[in-house]
Amino acid sequence: MRVLHVYKSYYPDTLGGIEQVIAQLGRGLAALGHESRIYTLSPDPDPPVIRRPEGEVHRSRVTAEISSNTVSWRALLEYREQLDWADVVHYQFPWPFGDLLHLLWARNKPSVVSYQSDIVRQKWLLRAYTPLMNRVLESVGLVVATSPQYLDSSPVLGRLRNKVAVIPNGVDESTYPQPGQEALARWRERVGEGFFLFVGVLRYYKGLHTLLEAARGFAGKVVIAGSGPEAPALEAQLRAGAAPNVQLLGHVSDEDKMCLLSLCRAFVFPSHLRSEAFGMSLVEAAMASRPMISCDIGTGTTFINEDGVTGWVVGPEEPEALRGAMQRLLDDADQARAMGQAARVRFENHFTAAHMAQAYEQAYRQVAVARTGTFLESGQKQERIP
């Protein structure tokens, strides 16, 4: 099959969780014999085509951006060329302009939508966008939720339950660098061992203000790695003496991230709003056999981190509960080790790129048969299903 992945932005312009999912899925599909192409918008699409391991990235120029919704006049014409190449189109939701492209040109194409998140913050945009959103979600062959928790808690997905499948996001461990001894020694000297780690983009919904409150009176050390719009506020809190046992590292490379995961006692993920729909950083922590602490917000974070098995789940914005969960893992090394091993088993069973790619392969075939009556095989002529 030829699969066209559609999203508002992509590498090298942006480095988010959905971009990572698309990249991991493209590589997983390639291993199954399928071809992927990514269609996206860019503020500087020069060159217009970039070749990457997961597939070619085709870019149209951004005309404007409104509340994180990128739009492009050129895409209104250039998107049609991509559809001629594709057997199946795979959209990442939400992206309102991508919905418009679908309704204009791709309503008769076999299509899948990965429903990554409800629109949480832009309430005014949601009111204007709802009619378009409903038309698109009703028109595609299949809508995919990334966890049972999100399917159960999303009012939008609840209305579409008869056409929703659950396919968790996953990663390919072989795409991550193995930390070298020299890098490990450098980080051990800088931050020590046995600390409690957060890695991610520093956004408003990550709950890091709660983590700083929880760090007060905590006997261990907290390390926060990442950059983002909340960095100045966190730095100001630390300068004011909010938590002397917290260290901000800023952006780190993938190798550095793997070093930090190797050295930490546990991974802390205090996201408190539903904008955190899944939590790829939790998947990486489970891959590294680390116990996790997260908040129950009715999303995939609680699917990845099983309370009492792979770590602890606490209420959102409850610093005392968060501190207590960290203290338990600090005080009981055996429990931390056992939960980390359980996290690794859960990763292998649910969150690998291979599992994700196999599930999407079946989803693509399902929508292709439903839409066209044809069975699609990579590199072969389409054949009518009897």
Image (tube, rainbow, N blue to C red):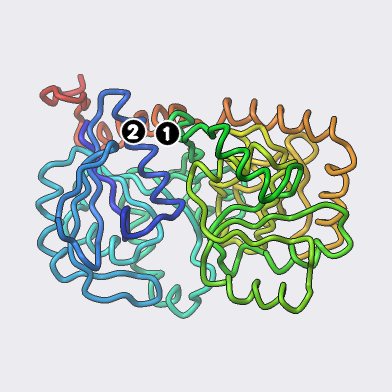
Q: Residue 11: give x, y in percent of width and height.
A: 32, 53
Q: Is residue 307 above or below residue 107?
A: above
Q: Residues within 10 Å of mark 1 (few under 14, many from 20)?
A: few
Task: Give the label on residue 175, or none.
Answer: 1
Q: Earlier in the sequence, mark 2 or mark 1?
A: 2
Which residue carries the number 2 mark?
27
* CB atoms of marks 2 and 1 within 8 Å: yes
Rendering coords of residue 33 (x, y %): 26, 23
Query: Residue at left 37%, top 55%?
Result: 137
**What secondary structure is marked by label 1?**
helix
- The residue under label 2 is which amino acid type? Arg
Look at discs 2 and 1 and give the one toward the viewer: 1
Place residue 15 in its image quadrant.
bottom left
Residue 129, placed above or below residue 369: below
Is 143 placed above or below 235 here?
above
Q: Position of residue 310 (x, y in %)?
A: 73, 36
User: Which of the 4 image quarters holds residue 237?
Assistant: bottom right
Q: Residue at x 28, y 66 (%)?
A: 97
Q: Please state which of residues 384 and 149 is positioned toward the viewer in this rendering.
A: 149
In 3D space, how far apart are the residues under numbered discs 2 and 1 (Cα atoms)?
10 Å
Side of 179 relative to 26 (left or right): right
